[in-house]
Image (spheres, rainbow, N blue to C red):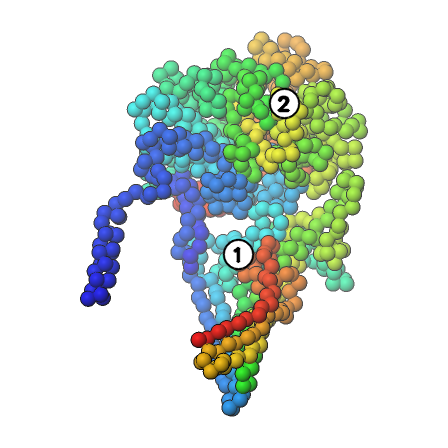
């Protein structure tokens, strides 16, 4: 009898455990079905898309939601900035990692390179998450309609990175289901055309996107879409292979839309400090930033990487630690017209008392050299070379506090688009449209405005015209270490060619030119293997 | 053979998933022997021996090679490969160059393809992997009247370990001494080889750090005495003393030749404690 009761109880347990259970959604939070229905979790999904350029995983620094050899190095901004900057004259990295030697010496191939792989993968993941948001929502109310335009912008930004770095990536929009088919490849020219029309649609009069500079920071509005459109159009020759003066005109027009809605910040260095997301002065200029917070968005990438890998021991820069990696050559800092032979020691000048020698010449010369340091880089010793102190986690508005006593991570938001860049885009587009030099009054005025904000001791543009060479130098000063160097050099045909050299270009101490096919990075071998719709970029073995 | 493989990006929410890819062939012989050579009224000796010879080879893979094993300092340096025809996790390294006295030359590796440059193409499949050719175990139990004594141990032959700790300590930056104005301890490995400069990638991933990690470990030794039928109650009490992780015989220079969790790369392990214990067992 006792046995029967036990048997019955077990049978009953087994029966109840089966009733309808197979049709339930997971119990842990709002997974899959519920996410886009309720407001709070939809905002989380939106934050996930926004965080795609900042975060490496769901569980803090060190976690990763993609499979990579190191979570921090796989962070989008760190990887993208690295391939855009370390492969150029702006910076070299002295670490022994294999990806560093390849990127720094312009010797990458289709063999897996961590930074080239991570940039591609993070950008494609951004596309995946953005598509998921768009697939599962519709314009049923004003609020969601606005969010959808922001997500479309973020996806466009990811596609711009893919267009610029990889040329012919896989292309997938929200109309294709998750994991159903392998995405088709798109050609560089077609992707350019799609991006241009997508951004033009976002800024059009009937777009739900908010007007420039009206969305709450750091969410994006038409200002960001105009900014990316301007940058895209300025680089069109790289993407479609021929120059079209109407596209230069479009670049200038889009840049002007941004300039109309934003100002230049009064203090250049405040744009790159720990409180730049709260400082009204910096926010008057920042159009689109990917945000970092020392407590809430920790990762070993982004601005933490620029600060920790770039700082010498004598500077606090508001973050605790030293990674001893990034250095800049004397050639790279000469553009600030500073006296590179003066044995000057520049202490961290948070107080802004102007006591240092370099920023007196140009406020953008946020560089330093220790007395005992060798000036010239040897590509393996951190002490040899110039240290860049542009990114600084201490606060501009509260200079007394040294955050390096408490902060393990940086809170500096990284401006991906800012008004200062648009001044340059406008001037360059006009100069290119006019055949290398322009007397367009606004173009000249914009360059003068940048030079005057920088407090340049001897401004280089004083007349009524401005030339492409002058603009190139201005870009080199204004946009130093902002992750666009490779793109700029390619536009000026100075990236692979032998007529513009820098130390360790092509892996040789005095610099040599390298193959033009390296102006596009290879599609990662992993993705070629997984997706047979893809064909490798020219010049690379599969 | 289950492995993480990449999936087409753009259609999924991750870049890698687990898939059953390729195939692998395992061959081996296992032998276990237990015998009791002595058994008298007072004496009993039990001896157990076991051994396994094994050979594992990858037969098919979807790609030429799958990179495995992080190490060699920094991020992204891979030390091992799965390749068809080789044991899984075979070390794939640069070949160290040595001077006439047999000392390794810092930052010099052999230019195996002879193109005058040190590149990835100079790496080679070492034919050495963390998988042993032979595993064995030994146990013994000797009892005399109420006394008992026993031990057991195990070992492996033909397994290799990449000594990443030694590798990490062999890089020297004398510029730091100059710039920081104070002396930094030079690590043992650097002193041992006379290294004076920072190591390049090829040096970090050189076969200099690959060591034979064959070993024998005495896991446990114990000695006990049993009081039988205490006070005629039928209760028995055994008092014993023992040591766990008694000793290791190995040529491996790192902390533990058996840090198998690390997959053949000895970089960051928890040391294994040696435990002395006194045991009391009561049967009633």
Left/right placement of residue B172 relative to residue A424 reads right
- Which is closer to the viewer, label 1 or label 2? 2
Mark 1: secondary structure: strand
Q: Is residue A156 visible?
A: no
Q: Quadrant of the N terminus of chain A?
A: bottom left
Left/right placement of residue A524 relative to residue B251 reads left
Residue at x 36% of width, y 39% of height: A29
Q: Is residue A347 visible?
A: yes
Left/right placement of residue A186 relative to residue B95 reads left
Badge 1 and badge 2 in a common chain: no
Q: Nearer the viewer, residue A237 or A360?
A: A360
Q: In the rendering, at what x and y percent does residue B39 appear?
A: 51, 89
Number of numbered markers: 2
Q: In the rendering, at what x and y percent does residue B275 appear?
A: 59, 65
Q: Chain of mark 1?
A: B
Q: In the rendering, at what x and y percent does residue A387 appear?
A: 69, 32
Residue B161 picture quarter: bottom right
Q: Nearer the viewer, residue B179 or A105?
A: B179
Residue for badge 2: A398
Residue at x 46% of width, y 43% of height: A66
Q: In the rendering, at what x and y percent does residue A56 appear?
A: 50, 39
Q: Is residue B78 above or below residue B23?
A: above
Mark 1 → mark 2, Cα distance in angstroms: 52 Å
Residue at x 44% of width, y 57% of height: B61
Q: Is residue A432 above or below residue A104?
A: above
Residue for badge 1: B81
Residue A496 picture quarter: top right
């Amino acid at each position: 009898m006792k046995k029967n009761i036990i048997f019955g109880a077990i049978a009953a347990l087994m029966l109840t455990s089966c009733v309808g259970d197979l049709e339930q959604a997971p119990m842990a939070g709002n997974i899959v079905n519920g996410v886009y229905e309720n407001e709070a979790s939809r905002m989380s999904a939106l934050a996930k898309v926004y965080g795609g350029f900042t975060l490496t995983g769901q569980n803090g620094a060190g976690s990763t939601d993609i499979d990579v050899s190191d979570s921090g190095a796989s962070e989008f901004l760190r990887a993208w900035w690295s391939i855009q900057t370390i492969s150029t004259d702006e910076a070299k990295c002295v670490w022994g990692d294999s990806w560093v030697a390849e990127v720094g010496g312009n010797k990458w191939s289709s063999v897996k390179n961590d930074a080239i792989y991570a940039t591609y993968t993070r950008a494609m993941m951004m596309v995946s998450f953005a598509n998921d948001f768009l697939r599962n929502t519709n314009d049923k109310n004003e609020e969601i309609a606005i969010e959808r335009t922001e997500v479309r912008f973020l996806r466009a930004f990811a596609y711009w990175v893919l267009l610029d770095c990889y040329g012919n990536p896989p292309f997938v929009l929200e109309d294709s289901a998750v994991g159903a088919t392998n995405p088709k490849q798109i050609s560089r020219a077609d992707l350019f055309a799609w991006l241009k029309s997508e951004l033009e649609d976002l800024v059009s009069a009937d777009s739900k996107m908010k007007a420039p500079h009206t969305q709450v920071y750091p969410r994006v509005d038409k200002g960001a879409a105009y900014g990316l459109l301007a940058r895209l159009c300025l680089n069109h020759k790289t993407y479609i292979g021929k120059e079209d003066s109407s596209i230069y005109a479009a670049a200038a027009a889009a840049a002007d839309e941004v300039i109309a809605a934003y100002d230049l910040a009064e203090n250049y260095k405040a744009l790159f400090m720990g409180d730049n997301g709260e400082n009204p002065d910096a926010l008057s200029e920042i159009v689109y930033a990917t945000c970092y917070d020392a407590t809430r968005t920790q990762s070993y990438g982004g601005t933490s990487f620029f600060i920790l890998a770039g700082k010498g021991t004598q500077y606090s820069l508001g973050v605790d630690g030293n990674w001893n990696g990034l250095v800049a050559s004397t050639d790279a800092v000469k553009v600030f017209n500073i006296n590179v032979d003066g044995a000057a020691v520049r202490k961290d000048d948070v107080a802004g008392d102007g006591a240092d020698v370099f920023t007196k010449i140009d406020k953008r010369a946020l560089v330093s050299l220790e007395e005992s340091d060798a000036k010239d880089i040897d590509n393996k010793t951190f002490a040899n070379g110039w240290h860049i102190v542009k990114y600084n986690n201490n606060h501009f508005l509260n200079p007394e506090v040294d955050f390096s006593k408490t902060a393990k991570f940086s809170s500096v938001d990284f401006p991906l688009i800012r008004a200062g860049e648009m001044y340059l885009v406008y001037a360059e587009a006009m100069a290119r449209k006019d055949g290398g030099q322009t007397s367009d009054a606004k173009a000249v005025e914009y360059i003068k405005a940048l030079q005057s904000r920088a407090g340049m001791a001897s401004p280089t543009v004083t007349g009524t015209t401005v030339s492409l060479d002058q603009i190139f130098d201005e870009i080199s000063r204004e946009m130093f270490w902002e992750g666009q160097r490779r793109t700029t050099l390619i536009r000026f045909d100075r990236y692979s060619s032998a007529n513009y050299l820098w130390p360790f270009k092509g892996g040789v101490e005095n610099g040599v030119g390298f193959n033009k096919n390296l102006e596009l990075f290879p599609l990662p071998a992993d993705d070629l293997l997984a997706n047979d719709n893809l064909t490798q970029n020219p010049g690379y073995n599969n | 053979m289950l492995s993480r493989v990449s999936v087409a990006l753009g259609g999924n929410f991750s870049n890698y998933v687990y898939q059953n890819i390729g195939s692998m062939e395992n061959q081996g012989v296992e032998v276990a022997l237990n015998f009791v050579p002595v058994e008298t009224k007072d004496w009993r000796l039990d001896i157990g021996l076991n051994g396994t010879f094994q050979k594992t080879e990858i037969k098919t893979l979807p790609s030429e090679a799958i990179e495995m094993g992080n190490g060699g300092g920094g991020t992204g340096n891979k030390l091992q490969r799965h390749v068809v025809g080789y044991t899984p996790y075979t070390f794939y390294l640069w070949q160290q160059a040595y001077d006439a006295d047999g000392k390794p030359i810092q930052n010099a590796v052999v230019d195996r393809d002879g193109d005058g440059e040190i590149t990835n193409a100079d790496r080679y499949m070492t034919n050495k992997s963390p998988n042993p050719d032979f595993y064995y175990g030994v146990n013994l139990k000797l009892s005399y009247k109420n006394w008992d004594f026993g031990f057991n141990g195990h070992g492996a032959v033909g397994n290799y370990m990449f000594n990443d700790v030694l590798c990490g300590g062999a890089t020297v930056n004398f510029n730091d001494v100059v710039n920081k104005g104070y002396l930094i301890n030079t690590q043992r490995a650097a002193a041992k080889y006379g290294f004076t400069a920072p190591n390049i990638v090829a040096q970090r991933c050189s076969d200099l750090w690959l060591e034979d990690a064959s070993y024998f470990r005495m896991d446990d030794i114990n000695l006990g005495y049993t009081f039988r039928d205490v006070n005629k109650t039928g209760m028995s009490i055994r008092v014993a003393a023992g040591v766990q992780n008694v000793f290791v015989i190995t040529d491996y220079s790192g902390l533990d030749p058996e840090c198998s969790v690390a997959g053949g790369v000895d970089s960051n392990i928890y040391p294994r404690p040696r435990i002395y214990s006194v045991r009391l067992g009561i049967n009633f």
